[in-house]
Image: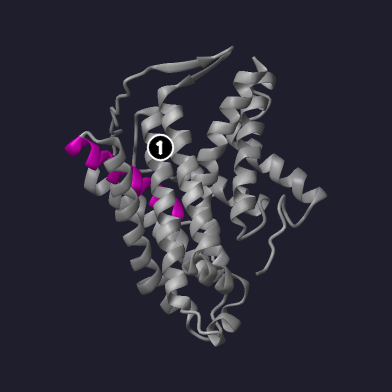
Amino acid sequence: MLSQQIVNGIMIGSVYALTAMGATLIYGILRILDIANAGAYAVGAYAGWYMYSVTENILLAFVFAMLFTGIIGVLVQKFIYFPIISKPNVIAIVPLITSVGLFTLTGDMLRLIFGPNVKNMNMTFKINAVEIGNVRISAEWIFIVLLTATLFFVLWFILNKTKLGLAWRATAADTEIAKTMGVNVHISMALSYVLGYGFAAAAGTMVGVLYNSIYPTMGDIPSYKMLAIIVLGGLGNPLGTVVAGIVIGLSETLVSAYFGSIMPRDVIAFVVLIIVLLVKPSGLVTRKNT
């Protein structure tokens, strides 16, 4: 049924958007395509798995995963990225290469600490699924969509209704002018990494819940798919990332459902990216400076 496929596409697209949101926030401030954000995706999944295995509390597992990984993000920004980008005449590709190295290191560290085998999340819900007409939505998806919507609302509130959000938007628009106006750009950068790595951790945990499995290399596919999403949405644009994530989710679901194996599912994101950029090079949503 078309309606079922549309619902499926919107749901998986929301997770894609959450996965890419961290990289979007970081690019908005530092102009770095942080591939290591996909490493945070995997770290968060393991943190959520560990906390759930100890407490059997789903919400606590998500909160712990986001906080733990967000703290790691701040440390990465302060002790790795900031010293690099603060040096004069740094070639723009250096931070990107650094992020690739961090991502590779993260996967290897997870494999050494937890082993190469798949871990099962084993999160249980009181209901199995909800049926609305011809559309069936599993309990896992209901939980994931509600949590994703909540996190996006929190992000919107922080960015648009708080002084921290105003500082982030000012820094993203022009770092030097923000400094002259008294904005603490270091706090803005830290906010980007707390939210960015925290959101990636939530997405990783969600995927672990959905497929009941996590493994050290689970960030490999998100590492390049999130790049397609943030470019498609307009670099550094949170709203564009949400739109692009849903567009990619719908495209993958509908093409896979109705055209079968015409192309691998994970290639569809880049086909959509190329088509859209040929028509609108700035992305789906043009970023506005504030």
Residue at 43 percent of width and 45 percent of height: 219
Residue 73, above or below 205 = below
The quadrant the C terminus occupies is bottom right
Estimate the x, y position of residue 39 in percent, counting from the top left. Answer: 40, 52
Quarter of the rendering containing residue 91? bottom right
Residue at 33 percent of width and 43 percent of height: 62
Residue farthest to the right, as pictured: 279
Estimate the x, y position of residue 198 in percent, counting from the top left. Answer: 39, 53
Residue at 43 percent of width and 62 percent of height: 193
Estimate the x, y position of residue 238 in percent, counting from the top left. Answer: 59, 55
Q: Which is the main secondary structure of the residues drawn in magenta?
A: helix
Residue farthest to the left, as pictured: 54
Which sits in the foreground, 286 or 94? 286
Q: Is residue 237 left or right of residue 190?
A: right
Residue at 46 percent of width and 63 percent of height: 192
Q: How is the image coloured?
A: one colour
Residue 81 showing in the rendered view = yes
Residue 169, above or below 158 = below
Quarter of the rendering containing residue 61? top left
**What segment is highlighted magenta in the picture?**
36-55
Estimate the x, y position of residue 72 in percent, counting from the top left. Answer: 33, 61
Q: Is residue 9 left or right of residue 39?
A: right
Residue farthest to the front, as pictured: 161
Residue 149, above or below 121 = below
Q: Tell me the kind of residue under disc 1.
A: Met
In the rendered image, residue 42 lying in the magenta stretch gets the answer: yes
Q: Secondary structure at mark 1?
A: helix
Other residues around mark 1 within 10 Å, as few (<14) / some (14–19) / many (≥20): many
